[in-house]
Amino acid sequence: MKTAAELKPGEKAIVKDVDNDHPSSHRLLEVGFTPGQEIEYISGAVFGDPMAFSIRGSIVAIRKNEASCILIKK
């Protein structure tokens, strides 16, 4: 299964699910990473962490390990 951490800058995807076993899963759902929502990977830092995503008209920066628990479909 592909995750948001695997997206390249400018790529869009649909959130399929968020891994509930991850400690940040609740926070990710609260900021808008909900199933069915379209996200776009905007950019990342030089070493890829944090990652900035456009979601629901806002830009949200999250850590790469948090992005890896967001399951996506293209």
Image (cartoon, helix red, strand yellow):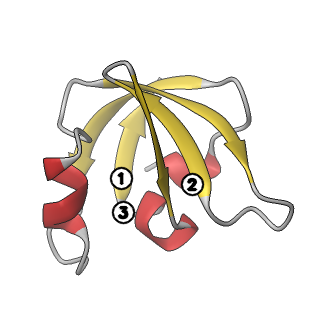
Residue 36 visible to an observer of this rendering: yes
Q: CA distance from mark 1 to mark 2?
A: 8 Å
Residue displayed at 50% across by 47% down: 4
Image spot of residue 28 (x, y percent)? 25, 55
Q: CA distance from mark 2 to mark 3?
A: 8 Å
| Residue tagged 3 | 69
| Residue tagged 2 | 5
Residue displayed at 72% across by 37% down: 8
* Three-letter amino acid code of the residue under disc 3: Cys
Q: Earlier in the sequence, mark 2 or mark 3?
A: 2
Vertical placement of 8 versus 58: above or below? below
Q: Tell which residue pokes out farthest to the front in this image.
A: 58
Judged from the image, the secondary structure of the residue bearing numbered disc 1 is strand
Q: CA distance from mark 1 to mark 3?
A: 4 Å
Judged from the image, the secondary structure of the residue bearing numbered disc 2 is helix
Image spot of residue 64 (x, y percent)? 56, 66
Residue displayed at 20% across by 65% down: 25
For residue 62, which numbered disc appears in the image?
none
The reply to whether the C-beta atoms of the residues labelled 1 and 2 are less than 8 Å apart is yes
Judged from the image, the secondary structure of the residue bearing numbered disc 3 is loop
Residue displayed at 26% across by 25% down: 37
